[in-house]
C-alpha cells in the first residue's frame, strides 16, 4: 500500500538521500536505522510532505502523493521533542487532528478516552501539557498522532529525549500499542536496541542509501558488508586472502570457513569474526588482552590484534589467550574491512 | 566594600532631585483650593485627546509594524540587517531632530511642498502638514515601529517550526496553522509591544509640541503650557498627578504582560524558519514592504541634512531674487551674532551651553553610576529593592521632572547645575546598565591572581580593572553625553532663557518666520543628528558585547 521509489534529496551540494526505496504492504513496523545526520529525519519530512524532494515518487496504493500538500496526506507524525501545542491542554492537543477531519464531538470525545487508555494516560484530559514529565509528554504526542486514525504512522527518533530506563519502558509499550492499533509504522532511529526491539523489518541507511534490509534476525546472521557488521557491532571485520574456496589467510591466522561465494584463489575477501565464545569450530584465535570492559552478563575483551571477544570469565590484563571463534565470510573485499595489525 | 557607602551618593542624589521634587508636586496639588469646573473641563479635554491620539498612533504603528515584523521574522533578503538598523535609528534620536526632519520633508518650506510649488507653479504650499494630527501620528509611527518589529519579529522567528509541522501533519492548512497555533503563541509578544508603544505615545511630548503646534494638547504639553505660559503651577502639578497615574497603570499592565506565560520554545536555529521568498506573491509583499519602509525612514532622515545645505528661497529683504543651489550659508550664520530679537541667542552659544551641560552630566552620571553599578554587580537583597528605583526617572516624563525642579528649587533656577542634574537622572539608568556588566565581568579570581603575584591594590586596579572598565566607561560617558545633548523636555522647562541648549534653540528657530531662521534650525538639527549617530555608533562599538541595555 505504501511505497517510495528512488527518493533523492540534496542538502547544500551534498547528496543526502541517494535513491531510497521502501515498500510497506501490511500492518508492520518498518524501521529505518542509520547514524546521526544520515538524513533519516529529512526522509520522514519528505514523506510527510513537509519538505520537498529533488527526485523520486511517493505512492499510497495507486495514488501519487507528490502533489498532495502535507495536511491532506493523512500520515501521523511523532516527534523526538514531542512538539505538543503548549497553549492547549492534553484533550485539545489530542483532539486537534480529529477537529481538522471535522469529526463530530461525540466521536472525538470517545476517541480521546480510547486513545488515552491505549497510552496508559487515562484521566489526563484536563492536564496542562507543560506540566507533564518527558515520558508523559511523549505518550500524549503518540496519542495525538494516533487519534485521527492515520493510514501511516511515522516516528522520528521518539525516544531520544528520554533517559534510559524510561526509554526501555516506553519501547515495550510502543510495541504493544502498535500491534493493537494495526496501523503500518515507519520508525526512524539511530539506536539499534530500539530498532531490534520494535521492528518487524529493518532498513539500514548509510551515506544516503539503503545498504541492507531484513528482519532483525537476518541482519545479525548475514550483515552483508563490513560497514553494516561494524555498525551493528556483530563482530570484528578483517581482510583476508583466499587460499582455497574454504580456506582464508589473514595476518592473524588462517581460518576455515563454509563459504558459498565461490572465491578464487588469491582473491580478497572480508571475514567477520563473531565475538561469542564457541566450541564448535576449529578456528583458533590468539592474542594479548589489552582491555576488558564489564558488560553485566559478559566481559568485552579487546585483543592487541584489534579483535574483540565476549567472555564469561574475566581474563587477566596483558595475558595471552587462545580461543575458538566463529568466522563468517561476508563476501568480496570491502572498503570497510581492515587488515589487522600483528605484534 | 560596604554597601551603604556605595549607595550613599546615588541615593542622596535621588532623594534630593527625584523624590523630593515629586513630593513637592503632590503637596502643591493638594493646595488647590478649588477644583473649578473650568479646570476639570480642561483636564477632561486634555486627557481624552491624549488617549485618542495614543490609541490612533498605536493602531497605525501596528498597521505598519505587524507586516514588517512578519517580514523580518520569516523572510531573508539582501539588505535586511541594514533595513532593520534603519528602523531603529529614530528611536534614539532627539525629538527636535525628528521634528526638524519631518519639517524638512513635509513642512511649508520642506522638499515636497517647495517641489510641488515649483512643479505646479503654485503660490502657496499645497500640503498642510505641520500642525496637523497627521504629523503627530506619522512621527509616532516613525519612532515606535521598531518596537513592534523587534519584539513581535523576534517572537515570530522563534516560533518552534516543529509545532507548525505537527499541526500540518494533523491536517491543518496554512490558515489554520496561523489561526490556531502561531497566533495564540504570539499573543504575549503582541500584548507587550502594543502596551509599550501605547505608553510611549501616551507620554509623548516633543513630537506633539513641535509637530502639532498650539492646536493639540496632550497632558504633557498642557503641563508645559500651564507651568511656563500661564504660570499656573498648581494646575500643572494636578496634571502631573493625572499623568503619573496613567503611566503607572499602563506600566503595570505592561509588566504583567511581559512576565506572562513563557511558552516552551525549543531553541531551533533561526535559520529553520527564515527563508528567501518563494512565490511571486511573497516577492511582491517583500518589495512592497521594503518600499514603504524606505519611504518612511529614509526620506525624512535624508531630507534634513539635504535641506540644511540647500538654498531654496529668497534671502531676507530680497524677495524677488530667488536663488537655488547648495549652500553653506546656514552653517555660517550659526556663528554670526545677529541681534534682532530680545530673546535671540547666537547659536554657537547654545552649542557651548549644551556642551557644558553635557560635560557636567557626564561627570555626575559617572560619579553616581559607578558606585551604584559596583553595588549592583554583586547584588544582595538591598539591590533587589534599589534597582527598580533607579529606573523610575525613565518612566517619569521629563516635563514632570522639570516642573518638580521649578517648584522645589525655584530659588536656584539661575544655577547652571539644574539642567545637568535633570539630565543625569535620565541618563543614570543607561550609565548603570552599561557599567554593571563590565564590573560583573571581572571575576575576583583575576584580582586575587594579580595580588598573589605581587601587585599592590592600585596596581591591581590599574592592570586588571581599568583595562576592562575603560571601554565601558567610554561607552557610559558617551551615553550620558548623547542623552544630555538631545534632551528637550526638561531643558525647555528649566533652562534659563538666555542659556538655551541646542534642542531648545532649534525649537526657537523653528518658531520664528523667515528662511534664514528656518535654515539655521535645519543646520543645527543636522549637526545634532550627526552627533547622535556618532554617539550611537560609538556606544555600540565600545560596549561590552552580548548585553543589551534596558
Image (tube, rainbow, N blue to C red):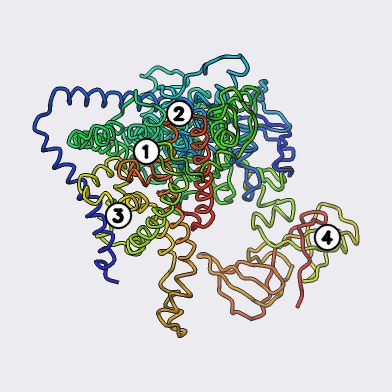
The residue pinned by badge 4 equals: A246
Closer-to-camera residue (B158/A197): B158
The residue pinned by badge 1 equals: B342
Callout 1 and callout 4 share a chain: no
> At which x and y percent is residue B202?
33, 32
Which circle, 4 or 3, is nearer the viewer? 3
Q: CA distance from mark 1 to mark 2?
A: 15 Å
The residue pinned by badge 2 equals: B513
Mark 1 residue element = loop
Which chain does tag 3 point to? Answer: B
Work out whether B137 lies above or below B153.
above
The quadrant the N terminus of chain B occupies is bottom left
The answer to whether residue B148 is seen in the rendering is no
Which chain does tag 2 point to? Answer: B
Mark 3 residue element = helix
Give me the residue at 17% from left, 25% from top.
B40
Closer-to-camera residue (A160/B406): B406
Q: CA distance from mark 3 to mark 1?
A: 46 Å
The answer to whether residue A252 is seen in the rendering is yes
Marks 3 and 1 close (CB-CB < 8 Å): no
Q: Check disc 2: other Cα within 10 Å, few if <14, some if 14-19, many if 20+.
A: few
Which circle, 1 or 2, is nearer the viewer? 1
Q: Which of the marked residues, 3 or 1, is nearer the chain's N terminus? A: 1
Q: Is residue A91 left or right of residue A154?
A: left
Q: Which of the marked residues, 1 or 2, is nearer the chain's N terminus? A: 1
Q: Check disc 4: other Cα within 10 Å, few if <14, some if 14-19, many if 20+.
A: some
Closer-to-camera residue (A189/A222): A189
Closer-to-camera residue (B282/A46): B282
The residue pinned by badge 3 equals: B387
Q: CA distance from mark 4 to mark 3?
A: 84 Å
Amino acid at each position: 500500500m505504501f511505497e517510495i521509489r528512488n527518493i533523492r534529496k540534496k542538502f547544500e551540494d551534498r547528496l543526502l538521500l541517494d535513491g531510497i526505496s521502501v515498500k510497506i504492504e501490511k500492518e508492520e513496523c518498518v524501521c529505518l536505522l542509520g547514524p546521526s545526520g544520515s538524513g533519516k529525519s529529512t526522509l520522514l519530512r519528505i514523506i510527510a510532505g513537509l519538505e520537498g524532494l529533488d527526485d523520486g515518487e511517493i505512492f499510497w496504493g495507486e495514488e501519487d502523493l507528490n502533489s498532495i500538500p502535507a495536511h491532506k496526506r493523512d500520515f501521523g507524525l511523532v516527534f523526538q521533542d514531542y512538539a505538543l501545542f503548549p497553549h492547549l491542554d492534553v484533550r485539545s492537543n489530542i483532539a486537534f487532528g480529529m477537529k481538522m477531519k471535522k469529526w463530530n464531538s461525540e466521536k472525538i470525545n470517545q476517541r480521546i478516552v480510547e486513545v488515552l487508555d491505549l497510552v496508559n494516560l487515562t484521566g489526563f484530559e484536563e492536564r496542562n501539557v507543560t506540566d507533564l514529565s518527558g515520558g508523559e509528554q511523549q505518550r500524549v504526542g503518540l496519542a495525538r498522532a494516533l487519534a485521527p486514525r492515520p493510514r501511516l504512522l511515522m516516528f522520528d527518533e521518539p525516544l531520544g529525549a528520554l533517559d534510559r530506563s524510561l526509554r526501555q519502558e516506553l519501547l515495550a509499550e510502543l510495541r504493544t500499542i502498535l500491534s493493537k492499533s494495526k496501523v503500518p509504522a515507519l520508525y526512524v532511529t539511530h539506536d539499534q536496541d530500539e530498532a531490534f526491539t520494535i521492528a518487524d523489518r529493518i532498513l539500514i541507511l548509510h551515506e544516503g542509501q539503503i545498504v541492507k534490509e531484513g528482519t532483525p534476525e537476518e541482519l545479525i546472521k548475514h550483515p552483508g558488508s563490513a560497514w553494516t557488521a561494524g555498525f551493528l557491532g556483530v563482530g570484528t571485520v578483517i581482510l583476508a586472502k583466499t587460499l582455497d574456496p574454504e580456506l582464508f589467510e589473514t595476518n592473524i591466522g588462517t581460518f576455515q570457513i563454509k563459504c558459498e561465494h565461490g572465491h578464487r584463489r588469491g582473491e580478497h575477501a572480508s571475514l567477520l569474526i563473531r565475538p561469542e565464545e564457541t566450541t564448535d569450530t576449529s578456528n583458533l584465535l590468539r592474542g594479548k588482552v589489552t582491555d576488558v570492559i564489564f558488560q553485566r552478563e559478559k566481559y568485552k575483551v579487546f585483543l592487541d590484534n584489534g579483535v574483540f571477544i565476549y567472555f564469561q570469565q574475566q581474563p587477566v590484563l596483558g595475558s595471552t589467550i587462545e580461543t575458538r571463534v566463529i568466522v563468517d565470510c561476508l563476501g568480496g573485499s570491502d572498503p570497510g574491512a581492515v587488515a589487522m595489525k600483528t605484534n | 566594600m560596604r554597601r551603604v557607602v556605595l549607595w550613599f551618593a546615588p541615593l542622596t542624589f535621588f532623594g534630593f532631585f527625584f523624590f523630593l521634587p515629586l513630593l513637592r508636586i503632590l503637596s502643591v496639588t493638594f493646595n488647590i483650593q478649588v477644583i473649578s469646573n473650568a479646570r476639570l473641563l480642561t483636564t477632561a479635554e486634555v486627557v481624552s485627546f491624549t488617549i485618542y491620539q495614543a490609541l490612533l498612533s498605536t493602531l497605525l504603528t501596528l498597521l505598519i509594524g505587524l507586516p514588517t515584523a512578519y517580514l523580518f521574522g520569516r523572510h531573508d533578503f539582501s539588505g535586511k540587517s541594514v533595513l532593520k538598523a534603519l528602523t531603529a535609528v529614530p528611536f534614539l534620536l532627539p525629538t527636535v531632530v525628528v521634528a526638524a526632519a519631518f519639517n524638512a520633508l513635509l513642512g511649508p518650506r520642506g522638499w515636497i511642498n517647495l517641489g510641488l510649488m515649483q512643479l505646479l507653479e503654485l503660490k502657496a504650499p499645497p500640503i498642510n502638514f505641520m500642525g496637523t494630527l497627521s504629523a503627530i501620528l506619522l512621527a509616532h509611527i516613525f519612532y515606535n515601529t521598531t518596537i513592534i518589529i523587534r519584539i513581535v519579529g523576534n517572537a515570530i522567528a522563534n516560533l518552534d517550526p516543529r509545532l507548525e509541522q505537527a499541526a500540518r501533519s494533523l491536517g491543518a492548512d496554512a490558515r489554520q496553522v496561523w489561526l490556531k497555533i502561531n497566533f495564540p503563541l504570539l499573543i504575549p509578544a503582541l500584548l507587550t509591544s502594543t502596551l509599550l508603544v501605547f505608553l510611549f505615545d501616551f507620554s509623548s511630548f516633543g513630537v506633539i509640541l513641535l509637530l502639532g503646534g498650539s492646536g493639540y494638547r496632550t497632558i504633557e504639553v498642557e503641563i508645559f503650557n500651564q507651568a511656563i505660559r500661564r504660570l499656573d503651577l498648581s494646575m500643572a502639578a494636578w496634571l502631573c498627578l493625572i499623568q503619573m497615574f496613567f503611566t503607572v497603570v499602563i506600566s503595570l499592565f505592561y509588566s504583567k504582560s511581559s512576565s506572562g506565560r513563557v511558552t516552551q520554545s525549543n531553541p531551533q536555529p533561526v535559520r529553520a524558519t527564515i527563508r528567501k521568498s518563494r512565490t511571486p506573491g511573497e516577492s511582491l509583499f517583500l518589495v512592497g514592504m521594503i518600499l514603504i519602509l524606505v519611504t518612511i525612514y529614509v526620506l525624512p532622515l535624508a531630507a534634513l541634512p539635504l535641506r540644511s545645505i540647500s538654498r531654496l528661497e529668497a534671502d531676507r529683504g530680497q524677495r524677488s531674487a530667488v536663488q537655488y543651489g547648495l549652500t553653506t550659508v546656514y552653517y555660517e550664520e550659526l556663528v554670526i551674532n545677529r541681534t534682532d530679537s530680545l530673546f535671540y541667542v547666537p547659536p554657537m552659544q547654545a552649542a557651548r551651553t549644551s556642551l557644558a551641560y553635557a560635560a557636567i552630566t557626564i561627570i555626575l552620571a559617572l560619579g553616581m553610576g559607578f558606585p551604584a553599578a559596583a553595588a549592583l554587580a554583586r547584588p544582595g537583597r538591598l539591590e533587589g529593592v534599589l534597582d527598580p528605583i533607579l529606573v523610575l526617572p525613565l518612566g517619569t516624563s521629563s516635563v514632570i521632572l522639570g516642573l518638580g525642579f521649578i517648584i522645589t528649587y525655584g530659588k536656584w533656577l539661575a544655577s547652571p547645575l539644574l539642567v545637568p542634574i535633570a539630565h543625569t537622572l535620565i541618563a543614570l539608568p543607561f550609565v548603570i546598565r552599561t557599567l554593571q556588566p563590565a564590573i560583573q565581568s571581572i571575576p575576583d579570581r583575576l584580582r586575587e591572581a594579580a595580588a598573589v603575584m605581587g601587585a599592590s591594590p592600585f596596581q591591581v586596579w590599574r592592570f586588571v580593572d581599568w583595562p576592562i572598565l575603560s571601554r565601558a566607561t567610554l561607552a557610559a560617558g558617551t551615553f550620558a553625553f548623547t542623552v544630555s545633548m538631545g534632551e528637550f523636555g526638561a531643558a525647555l522647562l528649566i533652562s534659563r532663557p538666555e542659556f538655551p541648549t541646542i534642542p531648545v534653540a532649534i525649537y526657537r528657530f523653528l518658531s520664528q518666520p523667515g528662511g534664514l531662521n528656518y535654515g539655521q534650525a535645519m543646520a543645527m538639527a543636522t549637526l545634532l543628528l550627526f552627533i547622535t549617530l556618532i554617539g550611537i555608533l560609538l556606544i555600540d562599538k565600545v560596549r561590552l558585547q552580548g548585553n543589551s541595555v534596558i
